[in-house]
Amino acid sequence: MAILITGGAGYIGSHTCIELLNAGHEIVVADNYINSKPESLRRVNEITGKTFKVYRVDLMDELDLEKVFIENTIEAVIHFAGLKAVGESVQIPLIYYEANIISTLKLCNVMKKHHVKKLVFSSSATVYGVPQRIPISEDSALSAMNPYGRTKLMIEEILADLYGSDHDWSIALLRYFNPIGAHKSGLIGEEPIGMPNNLMPYITQVAIGKLKELNIYGNNYPTKDGTGVRDYIHVVDLAKGHLKALEKVTKIPGVDAFNLGTGKGYSVLEVVAAFEKASNVKIPYKIVSPRPGDIAVCYADPTKARIDLGWNAEKGIEEMCIDSWIWQSKNPNGYEAAFNEEDSRLVKTAGIF
């Protein structure tokens, strides 16, 4: 019995693969490598010393996806695959709606056909829109502010309707806050495409000299230093949250949402200071205009995940910064140097990992 990981070559997916393999699970990975590289999976194999099947498949291709279920005994699915850049989603909303929502519908259709009804879904704190209260709990009002967030919210609603139609389904909706950090080995980490959208890879690319300075979007928010406050969570803690959610969905039917965050908020300038201390590298920055839709403060109430899943975030901001710096300094160009023609020619089933 295997766990299917869609988008398993991505940032959070690859870290979750490591945690699953180390916990003794058999995994199968499906990825189209649109915003990831096979090299991350080679490194998952290197870190764990364990082999696993990998399929180069786009979830939009239902026939190819079905081959994964035909050729493997799938017990449950952890669904990471999808487009994820907020700004880009505003520019190309139709592509985001198709890539995220239609692909999830196709996945669920194939799962249903093969009697696989256990699912952990990669959602987002963006489903809360502008929060009415802080910290944010799972019963807070839902109202996404951009196409990316709306795709996550729509998928949550679709999955709730799916359970309403068939109570054999068991679904966990994991609402991430701000994942940063990397595996302690420095072998895998976050590799943004083009200009980083998220704070930590922006900082690390300034630190290694790829970017001249950090843009800080606004310093007039009602916070301790005027910069936006967010809940940053170590990606390894986040990955472990998926194992806890998997345990729940394999035992109890239903559909439920869980915040995965630390419950602590750090301002942009506090993160910069923490990184400078961890790396001993000065980060030049300039204040620029706030981005439309950005909010002042956003951090989680993780109580429900602690009580219902038995999960707690364990790593602090210093460790997040140290691990981010180790990854970036060891891999100044991400996986690019290791990416080669063999990677680009990977067949549908690659038994090399």
Image (tube, rainbow, N blue to C red):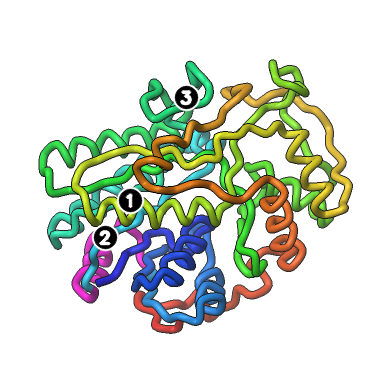
Q: Write down the residue under mark 1.
A: 120
Q: Is residue 164 visible to the viewer in this orientation of the structure? A: yes
Report the magenta stretch's main SS: helix
Inspect the magenta stretch and tell me whether residue 285 lies in it.
no
Task: Give percent across and percent down for residue 89.
Answer: 49, 37
Task: Give percent across and percent down for residue 257.
Answer: 34, 37
Q: Write down the residue under mark 2.
A: 76
Q: Amino acid at mark 2?
A: Ala
Q: Amino acid at mark 1?
A: Val
Q: Earlier in the sequence, mark 2 or mark 3?
A: 2
Inspect the magenta stretch and tell me whether residue 58 lies in it.
yes
The C terminus - image quarter: bottom left
Task: Give percent across and percent down for residue 156.
Answer: 31, 37
Q: Is residue 315 above or below residue 93?
A: below
Image: magenta residue range? 57-72
Tag 1 near tag 2, CB within 8 Å: yes
- Label total for image: 3
Task: Give percent across and percent down for residue 294.
Answer: 60, 25
For residue 129, the mark is 3
The N terminus - image quarter: bottom left
